[in-house]
Amino acid sequence: MDALTLRTEPTGLDVAYYRHGQGEPLLFLHAILGLQGWEPVLDALSTSFDVIAPHTPGWGPSQDWDVLDGPLDIALFYDDFLQALGVNCANVLGVSIGAWMAAELAAIFPHRVQKLILLNPLGIWLEAVPGEDPFAQHPMKPTEVLFSDPSLRERLLLQDQDKTEVYIRETHDLKAAAKFLWPIPDTGVRKRLPRISAPTQVVTSEHDAVVPPPYGRHWQHAINGATLTTLPGVGHVATLEAPETCAQLARDFF
């Protein structure tokens, strides 16, 4: 499936995004790895939802590096994006850095978010449980740490792809994430989480080396009424490793 392009106002940003399916709108906010095209998890979700999956500015073909400088800019961007689509309110599933962005949107523009899933959310730093640094990995294997098994990078990202293009894309997308998460991945979101009013489910992955499962309790406790669950056997990018499991989780909650 080819990406669409939409111009948001008043910024005039051209945003690349995918949209397909029927049902309630579901806004999917991608991980630090970016979108790998129309991913299997999006296809699975589209059987139950009107799936909207944008490339956040700085990732993939959405090249506007300088427009997002912090939480308010991110929330404003997604408010503008939904406005341009004519979507007043959506279920939101955020993964990794996308979960942080989803939380900011829900805290700052609560009327935009019907229900919220935060899957392996980045944005809080625990000194006692630091996790792996995704920006301090082998330069030729920069995203292995995001998977439960390093060999999954080869199978899910490199197989049948031009490896040079994959390396360039990985570097590009990690650079976009580093703008918000390096050197210390604490965005200050913790103090805004109590503002979230949407029913929320926090999800951790059993083998997430970047956001270890203990982080889930901190997110859950900061959001009124949030529930917490753990996906067995998967790593940080659970939507790539177990797309149908993640899609079923969304169907059950949304």
Image (tube, rainbow, N blue to C red):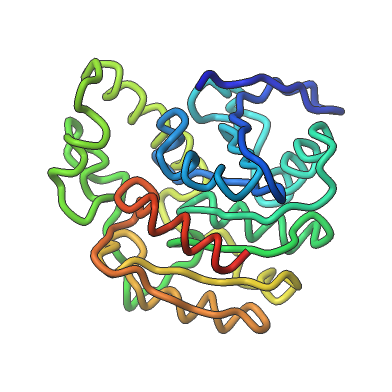
Of residue 253 and residue 120, the one placed in the foreground of this image is 253
Q: Compared with residue 85, is residue 26 higher up or lower down, i.e. above or below?
A: below
Residue located at (62% from left, 71% from top): 200
Quarter of the view holding residue 220 = bottom right
Q: Position of residue 190 (x, y in %)?
A: 60, 71
Residue found 55% across the figure and 45% down from its top: 47
Which residue shows up at 73% across the image and 52% down it? 90
Residue occupying the far left of the picture: 151
Q: Give 17 or 214, whichever is nearer the viewer.
A: 17
In-image side of 68 versus 220 (left or right): right
Is 20 above or below relative to 145? above
The tally of labels here is 0
The x and y percentages for residue 164 are 24, 16
Q: Where is residue 212 in the image (x, y as percent from the top left)?
A: 32, 69
In front of the other: 242 or 17: 242
Q: Which residue is drawn at 53% across and 47% down?
A: 45
Residue 20 position within the rendered picture, expressed as x and y whole percent measured from the top left: 61, 33
Task: Examine the rendered structure and indicate whether residue 141 appears above or below residue 27.
Answer: above
In the displayed structure, does residue 252 sit left or right of residue 111? left
Quadrant for the C terminus in the image = bottom right
Name above or below for residue 76 compared with residue 164: below
